[in-house]
Image: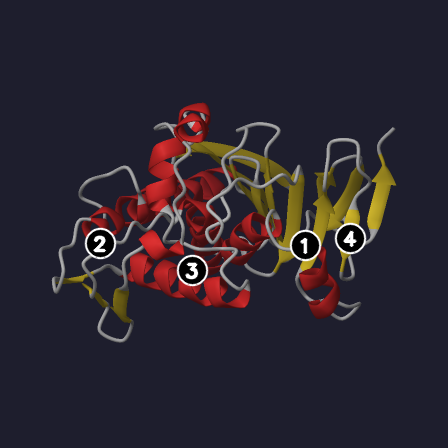
Amino acid sequence: MKSHRFEHQAMATVFEIWIDSDDGVYAKQAALEAWRLVDEIESELSFYREESDISRINAMRLGESIFIGEHARRSLSLSLQLCQETEGAFDPNVGHSMKVIKDEKGNASRWSEWFASKKKLTAESKGILIFDEANRSVELASDLPVSFDLGAIGKGYALDRVALLLKVWDLPRFLLSGGGSSLLAGAPPEGKMGWEVSLGKKEYEISERSLGASGIPIKGIHIIDPQKGMPTTRFRAWTFAKSAARSDALSTAAMLLPLKWFQDRLDSSSEELFCIQETEQSELLCFGAFPNEKRTVD
């Protein structure tokens, strides 16, 4: 089998698909359908599009109720669930902070202005949303507005939906990437144990698993503690999971959670696995049973 690569611009990044298949034409047709799906998802979830469901939610007034699309429903439901699981470390209702420090490309270019102004945006400054998942409706139930930003889960959610699409097309051998920080591996290439991924100087082989990465080396300081209103000091974090949406969100939360959170919840049987690097010079701290290490890069 040959590996065919396709790419697409969406969600302010580059999405990539590698498909292992003998039929390159068929693989390309599937990739085009995948890109159509990614664009559809972005149209509902984008924080920067006025017509998106997320922007419509953020523009609501007290007592107003709106209906949202299926992608927004699924993503919002998972976001609220993960907010509870991580004790608020992952919080989708942080758009007000992100507007202040992020530019249109998602880079933290405005951080210095925010820090200089000594603004502090905490949980007390957020509005309350009533979410009726069964009816796909949301209602603003407070005088304060909400400000949802699903950027930390949107790319992963898109990869999860593309993976389902490729399996329907009977193309199970694939690797998906959303900007390099979100990866989702299907079945491995023929004759291999898995798709190769890197964590710092270590390389692993993964299949039927996702890897999410967060950190400050590329985009600078852009992850804010939702409860304290202050930035993370952690350098990088990675999360392995079965779902790319979960690994995306959990890698963001891992930039904030205390080490005791990992120690108390993870053991050798854990399906979700974390790797933390406190500073650029620190050794990796791993929690859970990691995939077989392929090799260490010198």
Q: Check residue 79 in the rendering and tell me which mark sits there, or answer none.
A: 3
Q: Earlier in the sequence, mark 4 or mark 2?
A: 2
- Amino acid of disc 3: Ser
In the rendered structure, the answer to whether residue 125 lies left or right of residue 51 reads right
Using the rendered image of the protein, determine whether residue 12 is visible from the camera's viewpoint: no
- Residue indicated by mark 1: 207
Q: Which residue appears farthest toward the bottom when viewing the image?
A: 134
Picture mark count: 4
- Mark number for residue 57? 2
Give the vertical position of 178 relative to 37 (above or below).
Answer: above
Calculate the distance from the C-alpha at mark 4 to the C-alpha at mark 1. Answer: 19 Å
Q: Of the two numbered discs 4 and 1 on the same chain, state the one appearing first in sequence.
A: 1
Q: Is 295 on the left or on the right of 112, as rendered? A: right
* Residue name at image x 69 percent, y 69 percent: 265
Instruction: Tell me which residue sits at (62%, 59%) in the image.
Output: 241
**Residue 97 screen position, x and y as percent:** 38, 41
- Real-space Cα separation, disc 2 to disc 3, in angstroms: 15 Å
Residue 59 in sight here: yes
Residue 162 image offset from top left, x and y in percent: 45, 51
> In this view of the protein, which residue sits in the foreground, 122 or 89?
122
Residue 216 is left or right of residue 169, and the answer is right
At label 2, counting other C-alpha atoms closer than 10 Å, the crowd grade (few under 14, some 14-19, many 20 or more) is many
Q: Nearer the viewer, residue 89 or 293?
A: 89
Q: Nearer the viewer, residue 279 or 132?
A: 279
Residue beneath label 4, please? 286
Q: Assess disc 4: are there few (<14), some (14-19) or many (≥20) residues with their C-alpha within 10 Å of its C-alpha.
A: some
Query: Of helix, strand and loop, which one carries label 3?
Result: helix
Q: Secondary structure at mark 1?
A: loop
Which quarter of the figure is the N terminus placed in? Answer: top right
Q: From mark 1 to mark 3, how far is it between C-alphas?
A: 25 Å
